Image (tube, rainbow, N blue to C red):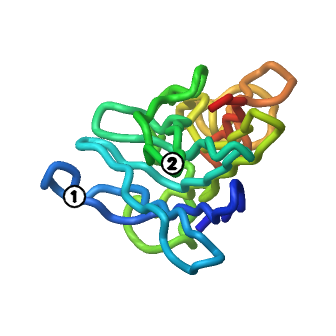
Amino acid sequence: MQQVTYANGKLWGSLDTALNPDGGPARAGIAWFIVNPNSGKIVMQDYVGATGYDFTYPAIAVTSSGRGVIAFTATGDTTNPSAAFAPIDAIAGVGTWDIVTGGDGATQDDGFSSYVAQGSGNPPRTRWGDYGAAVVDGNSIWIASEYIAEGCNYADWGGPFFAGGSGDNLLGTCGGASHGPGKRGAIGNWATRISKLTP
């Protein structure tokens, strides 16, 4: 569970889970809960999932009026890892999910930004950032979700250190010959999309 929020007299939380949307194969989804801390009872709970999609690393923030947002990463059969959200309240539950403006994933996991130490397999397990966040700012909510903002090929990732590579930036930044910041941080193939929403 990334975080728990207390708002409008209730505790709100969410976590990763496995779902079978529409009775299909197992996918990554979200379980969410709204709890009355005074009575110790669940006010409402349910799941967020969709056929052909995986939703990961959810985080909830809720304004004092009881309207909030679940932030998460959405990826799927035809969707590159993207920053997404869904509205939530204690009356209607969760509304229709969407990708935030500018949060569309640029490409698939590149398959080479991996750590051998993260596990066995060939190729080794790709390192994902494993986080999500959401925070209230007056009547608005700031969310932070992982997504793939930039693509990169193996030669550019290796830069001048690999055969066929060019540029002089640090290994893994995909910076090319610009002499400035690369497209992404070394080793990781993900970025963080920060967005402001008003539920």
Rendered view: 12 above or below 72:
below
The quarter in which the C terminus is drawn is: top right
Label 1: how many residues lie within 10 Å, few (<14), some (14-19) or many (20+)? some
Q: What is the secondary structure assignment of the residue under circle 1?
A: loop
**x and y percentages locating residue 114 in the rendered image:** 54, 56
- The residue lying toward the viewer, choosing from 146 and 12, is 12
Outermost residue on the front side: it is 39
Q: Which residue: 23% across, 43% down? A: 51
- The residue lying toward the viewer, choosing from 42 and 82, is 42
**x and y percentages locating residue 68 in the rendered image:** 62, 43
Label 2: how many residues lie within 10 Å, few (<14), some (14-19) or many (20+)? some
In the rendered structure, which amino acid carries the disc numbered 1? Asn
Which residue is disc 1 drawn over?
20
Residue 78: quadrant of the picture: top left
Q: Which residue: 68% across, 41% down? A: 143
Position of residue 5 in the picture relative to residue 130 (left or right): right
Outermost residue on the right side: it is 179
The quarter in which the N terminus is drawn is: bottom right
Q: Which of pointers 2 and 1 lies earlier in the amino acid sequence?
A: 1
In the rendered structure, which amino acid carries the disc numbered 2? Phe
Rendered view: 97 above or below 178:
below
Residue 183: quadrant of the picture: top right
Outermost residue on the left side: it is 23
Q: Is residue 187 visible?
A: no
- The residue lying toward the viewer, choosing from 181 and 141, is 141
**Mark 2–mark 1 distance (CA, rounded to whole Å):** 30 Å
Which label sits on residue 112?
Answer: 2
Residue 23: quadrant of the picture: bottom left
Q: Which residue: 72% across, 38% down? A: 141
